[in-house]
Image: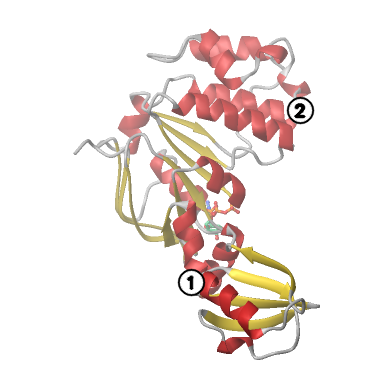
Amino acid sequence: MSTPAIRLDSVTKRYGDLTAVDDLTLEVPAGQVLALLGPNGAGKSTTTEMILSITKPDGGAVRVFGRSPTEALRRGDTGAMLQNGALLWDTKVGRLLRGMHSLHHHPLSLDEVIELADVRSFLRTNTNKLSGGQAQRVRFALAIMPDPRLLILDEPTVGMDVESRRRFWASMRAFTLTGRTVVFATHYLDEADEFADRIVVLDGGRLIADGTGAEIRGVVGGRQITFTGPDLDYLTLPGVVESTVDGDRRVLTCTDSDAALRGLFDLTETGTVRDVEVHSPSLEDAFLTLTKVA
Ligand SMILES: Nc1ncnc2c1ncn2[C@@H]1O[C@H](COP(=O)(O)OP(=O)(O)OP(=O)(O)O)[C@@H](O)[C@H]1O
């Protein structure tokens, strides 16, 4: 077994009476893209800060490629893009990148950084004139510059418009093609679902779910059938566990939507059931269910 990129063993972090991270155990294999998902205050930033040695746990152990977070950072194994990380003020982007480049032991070539982070079109722009999305791309350039094996991104696309987000994730994809490990914290369920191999949901500092998007979605159970139809007792149908009304639509929650559909058409007179739709639960549904019951 190769050494995991990250290993958290019963990690706890307290701020006074508040437990920001509560007995968190998590192993991230090298090469995985992992999303940390959770509502405000769930403990996502605190977790990433411990992996980056910005803060130390009060209990438990954090290892990064088998070493302490400080040692991993010193060796250039970790790169980070933090929320609103400050950029050197009033400096041309190109100059900033060249200056920082000279500080690293085994950086990516400047050309590669510029390509991957997609910053070429504003190398001559001053850092104080950048749009929010451009500033994020410069932060991303600085994060990948040390050629880290592990990249930590704390809500990297906050404040970006749709096009900037698309470009950002395209850059990220290119960066992960060579087997690097990425951990990103996000509030955007669609991003977690689309870009992560695995999603870990935190709430109140605790891990409340861990799996692929499909596995997390499975938490809310089977599919729903919605339709417009007569007032009948649909709970008698096979595979139906709940029957509710939403406006003029009837909503059946099913353990077996195929059996329920067959039963629905047998039960009702031809033409009385209209506009039938079958939905898989969304990640949003799963997230709400998870954070409600946790
Ligand atoms: N330096 C600190 N001092 C005191 N409390 C803190 C500190 N940092 C974080 N906290 C508290 O710890 C809890 C977890 O915060 P954290 O920033 O890790 O959550 P988060 O999931 O990243 O939230 P968000 O999505 O809002 O960024 C919160 O209740 C927060 O107020």
Location of residue 69 in the rendering, given as x and y in whole percent from the top left corner: 34, 37
- Please state which of the two labelled residues, at mark 1 or mark 2, is closer to the viewer: 1
Q: Which residue is mark 1?
A: 294
In the picture, residue 244 is in which quadrant?
A: bottom right
Residue 32 vertical position relative to residue 261 in the rendered view, above or below:
above
Q: Residue at x 29, y 38 (%)?
A: 68
Q: How many marks?
A: 2
> Is 227 on the left-hand or right-hand side of 173?
right
Residue 73 vertical position relative to residue 120 in the rendered view, above or below:
below
Residue 148 in view: yes
SS state under label 1: loop
Q: Residue at x 59, y 52 (%)?
A: 189
Residue 15 in view: no
Say which amino acid is labelled 2.
Answer: Ser
Asked if disc 2 is less than 8 Å from ligand 1, the answer is no
Q: Most extreme residue toward the front, as rendered?
A: 270
Which disc is residue 243 wearing? none
Location of residue 293 in the rendering, given as x and y in whole percent from the top left corner: 51, 74
- Which tag, 1 or 2, sits closer to the chain's start? 2
Say which amino acid is labelled 1.
Answer: Ala
Which disc is residue 131 wearing? 2
Pick the residue in front: 63 or 177: 177
SS state under label 2: loop
> Is 156 on the left-hand or right-hand side of 104?
right
Residue 142 vertical position relative to residue 9 in the rendered view, above or below:
above
Marks 1 and 2 sit apart, C-alpha to C-alpha, by 38 Å
Pick the residue in front: 162 or 221: 221
